[in-house]
Amino acid sequence: MTSERILCAVGARGGSQGVPGKNIRPLLGKPVIAWAIEKALAVPGITQVIVSTDSEQIAEAARAAGAETPFLRPTELAAPDSGKFQVWQHALATCEQIHGIEYDLYVDIDCTNPLLGAADIAGAIELFRTLRRQGRNPDAVFTVSEARRNPYFNLVEPDAEGLLKMSKSMGVGTVLARQRAPAVFEHVAGVYVLAARYVKAASHLLDGRAFGYQIPPEQAFDIDSELDFTIIEFLLRRRLGLAG
């Protein structure tokens, strides 16, 4: 059987607003983006690791960490409201054109979650393959974590009058215990494994058959604020046994 061709892309836009320069900000001695690249390079079977960015400064840091930067992302795909799926489509199409090959799987790594490891990337890829062997026809597998709040139990939203109601109902009265509420999961910025054909044909992650690769809550952080950065730095120090 011919080995799968897997393109792994790390997305890193240059114009971060919540934490300016976060993708190349030093984190325990190396740029944030280097954590993602090093993990991706450690996963067996990945054909290429590339970085999709609009910033030459980020591209330089990416190359220093061992990734390829075969293109700079167009401006229209580097705005704060640019769709992630469209960024994936551009990266996949551009790399296939440059290298003259077709990939089987497309893996995206969010560089702003340094708490995920190479084992999580490999695990998500293996879950995709397992689901495929089982005949469950996956289009995508991505990282999720059990939600800290549940819309059936302790998430509320205002109605037209501003009165608070439960966000979701089971249609059988109020859920009085968290344990009786249906399981819900947070979509965690982390790892996405997609069939390349699906990236080309769809327009959104949840258009097709998507499955979750569950990670523990202590890994379900990404850098969207200074507080996030502080938490992640603390958790990394504890994991690596560093003082301070």
Image (cartoon, rainbow, N blue to C red):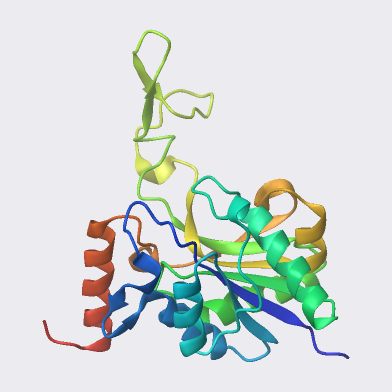
In the orientation shown, which residue stands out farthest toward the right? 1
**Residue 105 placed where, x, y %?**
74, 73
| Residue found at x 61% / y 50% | 76
Rendered view: 221 above or below 236: above
| Residue found at x 67% / y 62% | 88
In the orientation shown, which residue stands out farthest toward the left? 244
Q: Position of 2 compared to 127: left or right?
A: right
- Near-viewer residue (145 or 50): 50
Corner quadrant of residue 211:
bottom right
| Residue found at x 43% / y 36% | 151
**Residue 176 placed where, x, y %?**
35, 32
Locate the N terminus and report the quarter of the image it occupies: bottom right
**Residue 195 placed where, x, y %?**
76, 67
Q: Is residue 65 visible?
A: no
- Near-viewer residue (108 or 176): 108
Corner quadrant of residue 217:
bottom left
Q: How many marks overall?
A: 0
- Near-viewer residue (42 or 51): 51
**Residue 205 placed where, x, y %?**
66, 52
